[in-house]
Amino acid sequence: MFKLTKYVLMVFDQALGDLFVVRTAGNVVDPVAIGSVEYALEHLKVPLIVVLGHMKCGAVKATVAGGEAPGSIGAVVAKIKPSFDKVKANGVAGDEAVEETATENVGATIAELKKSPVIKHLLESGKVSIVGAKYHLDTGKVQWFEQ
Ligand SMILES: [Zn+2]
């Protein structure tokens, strides 16, 4: 767990404790993850939500590959599937479909977070902002999405 947090710290050059990291496969959110974000905003006064996807995401690859996902991985895949369905409908396939699905999925997670009344209220008050981004494994660069 510490190792994963350190990884994110390195990406944004932040010191220990500067980031409240809610990390899930495929950057999907469920009520526990949304509650964790709400806690960070309400109690720790975190001013910015970054939904950070990444290239060559295994969870997205599993979604695009289809088939049976073992255990609770199916719950992750089910969250990503609507994003892949959109990409597939545009006739995109292969590695390109993985990357476009990952990008679409960041947007889907932002949309889901915005449905939380707590987050919605804080966004509307201007106390909190939300942005999407994608981490490029090959270059170490973070690409910020347009709003
Ligand atoms: Zn991933």
Image (tube, helix red, strand yellow):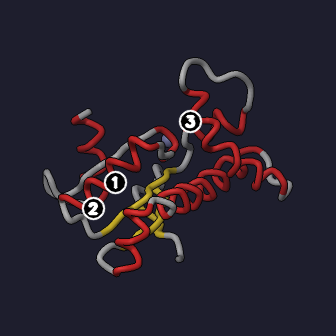
The kind of residue tagged 1 is Val
Task: Determine the image quadrant of residue 40.
Answer: bottom left
Left or right: 54, with 6 as reference point: right
Circles 2 and 1, Cβ within 8 Å, touching? The answer is yes
The crowding category of the residue bearing disc 3, from other C-alpha atoms within 10 Å (few below 14, some 14 to 19, many at least 20), is: many
Marks 3 and 1, how far apart at CA: 18 Å
Circles 3 and 1, Cβ within 8 Å, touching? The answer is no
Residue 134, above or below 85? below
Q: Which residue is mark 3?
A: 76
For residue 37, the mark is 1
Residue extending farthest front: 117
User: Mark 2 or mark 3: which is in front?
Assistant: 2
N-terminal of the pair, mark 2 or mark 3, is: 2
Marks 2 and 1, how far apart at CA: 6 Å
Q: Residue at x 32, y 68 (%)?
A: 48
Residue 36, above or below 67? below
Q: Residue at x 34, y 46 (%)?
A: 22
Q: Residue at x 46, y 69 (%)?
A: 144
The kind of residue tagged 2 is Leu
Residue extending farthest left: 16
Marks 2 and 3, how far apart at CA: 24 Å
Q: Which residue is mark 2?
A: 41
* SS type, badge 2: helix
The crowding category of the residue bearing disc 2, from other C-alpha atoms within 10 Å (few below 14, some 14 to 19, many at least 20), is: many
x and y, in percent, of residue 131 in the image: 44, 68
